[in-house]
Image (cartoon, grey):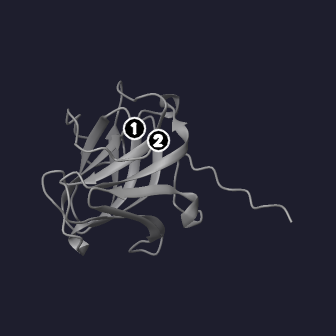
């Protein structure tokens, strides 16, 4: 028999492939896994534990994000606590912040218009950069349905560039 064909992970990402198809990791106190979320849909689970304020999780795509497909990144994020959730193109050190109200699943939008970096495959997430997490449910978020679009119409606060580095190397390439 022929070996199975591995999935190519590119935007949009809905985490419905086998968990081992995704190159993900937590860093500096963050823990990442692919598993069923609160509604049963398979998602990226990110738990912020004790560690650095920038403890986070990342996913590495098999193909680079292309600005021609849109400069807005959207994600469905589940949180039970109001938090600012940062999305960062790690290698380019370009990030945006969106506010989550803590009401369960919300569609967040990260507007990189005019600042979408080229040749990026690694996307990092940070849950409230102002403080350490403690690994409890209050510091657990689920991320699903990562996509690109040309319009910022999914709601949420697109915030602005927070400027500067969030600290720490998230490892990997």
Q: Residue at x 36, y 40 (%)?
A: 90
Quarter residue 135 falls in: bottom left
- Residue 148 numbered mark, or none: 2
Query: Residue furthest toward the left?
Result: 130
Q: Which mark is residue 72?
A: 1
- Quarter holding residue 157: top left
Residue projecting furthest to the top = 114
Q: Secondary structure at mark 1?
A: strand
* Residue farthest along the right direction in this orientation: 1
Badge 2 vs badge 1, beta-carbon distance below 8 Å: yes
Where's the C terminus, which quadrant? Answer: top left
How packed mark 2 is, by other alpha carbons closer than 10 Å (few <14, some 14-19, many 20 or more), is: many
In the rendered structure, the answer to whether residue 139 lies left or right of residue 32 reads: left
Where residue 37 appears, x then y in whole percent?
41, 71
Where is residue 12 drawn, in percent x and y? 53, 48
Answer above or below: position of 64 versus 34: above
Q: Is residue 95 visible?
A: yes
Image spot of residue 160 (x, y percent): 22, 35
The disc placed on residue 86 is none
Q: Is residue 11 visible?
A: no
Crowd tier of the residue under label 1, counting other residues whose Cα lies within 10 Å: few below 14, some 14–19, many 20 or above: many
In the image: residue 26, left or right of residue 63: left
> Vertical placement of 128 versus 165: above or below?
below
């Amino acid at each position: 028999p022929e070996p199975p064909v591995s999935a190519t992970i590119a935007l949009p990402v809905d985490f419905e492939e086998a968990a081992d198809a995704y190159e993900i990791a937590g860093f500096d106190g963050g823990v990442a896994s692919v598993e069923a979320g609160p509604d049963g849909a398979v998602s990226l689970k990110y738990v912020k534990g004790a560690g650095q304020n920038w403890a986070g999780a990342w996913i590495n795509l098999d193909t680079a994000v292309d600005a021609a497909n849109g400069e807005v990144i959207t994600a469905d994020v589940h949180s039970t606590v109001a938090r600012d959730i940062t999305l960062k193109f790690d290698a380019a050190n370009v990030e945006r912040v969106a506010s989550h109200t803590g009401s369960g699943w919300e569609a967040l939008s990260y507007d990189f218009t005019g600042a979408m970096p080229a040749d990026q495959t690694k996307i990092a997430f940070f849950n409230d950069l102002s403080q350490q997490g403690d690994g409890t449910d209050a510091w657990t978020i689920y991320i699903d349905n990562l996509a690109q679009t040309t319009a910022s119409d999914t709601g949420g606060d697109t915030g602005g560039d927070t400027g500067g580095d969030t600290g720490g190397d998230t490892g990997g390439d």
